[in-house]
Amino acid sequence: MKLNEGEMICNKCEGMGTLPSEQDPNTMAKICKKCFGHGKVDWLENILGKKAIQSNSSSGWGASSSSGIPQETLDKMSQHLADSIDKDIMETMINELEQKTNKMKAAAAVFSKMEGYQFDNGIIS
């Protein structure tokens, strides 16, 4: 982030432009209300607070040009969300694989006790 003369990093969000969610501290869910997602303020804004830029979109949210949220902040939030989704998907897949592995081990134990069956590397013969 480039700071111009008289600007400083927002001390509320530490320059991130977003704040952690109260429900899940690992999730960046809220736009900083001190800098409105810019991550920086000038000396006057640091004292009085930054004025929110009004959006032209009907929902109040849109592209960075209409919402006033810097593209860099939107990109960081998007990347954080994508990383969280990827992590959740991987954890789900690993858990399912572990459950299937445990079921196979239980089946192997049952078949190994049965007379006339052998279980070798997942193959019953």
Image (cartoon, grey):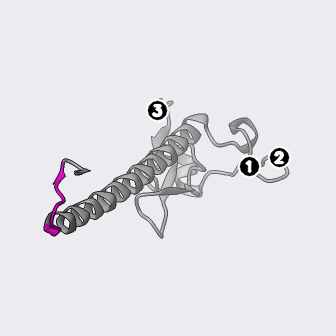
Q: Which residue is located at x 25 percent, y 64 percent?
A: 107
Residue closest to the eye, 48 or 78: 78
Three-letter residue code for mark 3: Met
Pointer 2: what residue? 57
Residue 107's disc number: none
Q: What crowding class fits label 1: few (fewer than 14 Cα within 10 Å), some (14-19), or many (20 or more)?
A: some
Residue 109 is left or right of residue 46, and the answer is left
Task: Check if mark 2's residue and mark 1's residue have beta carbons within 8 Å.
Answer: yes
Residue 7 is left or right of residue 119, and the answer is right
Three-letter residue code for mark 2: Ser
Q: Give the range drawn in magenta.
A: 113-120
Pointer 1: what residue? 61
Residue closest to the eye, 12 or 112: 112
Instruction: Examine the rendering and report whether any part of residue 104 can be seen.
Output: yes
Residue 1's disc number: 3
Residue 72 location in percent, x, y? Answer: 55, 35
Residue 121 is left or right of residue 84, and the answer is left
- Dot 1 lies on which element? loop
Of labels 1 and 3, the one closer to you: 1
Work out how far the residue at label 2 is from the one at label 1, CA to CA, in angstroms: 6 Å
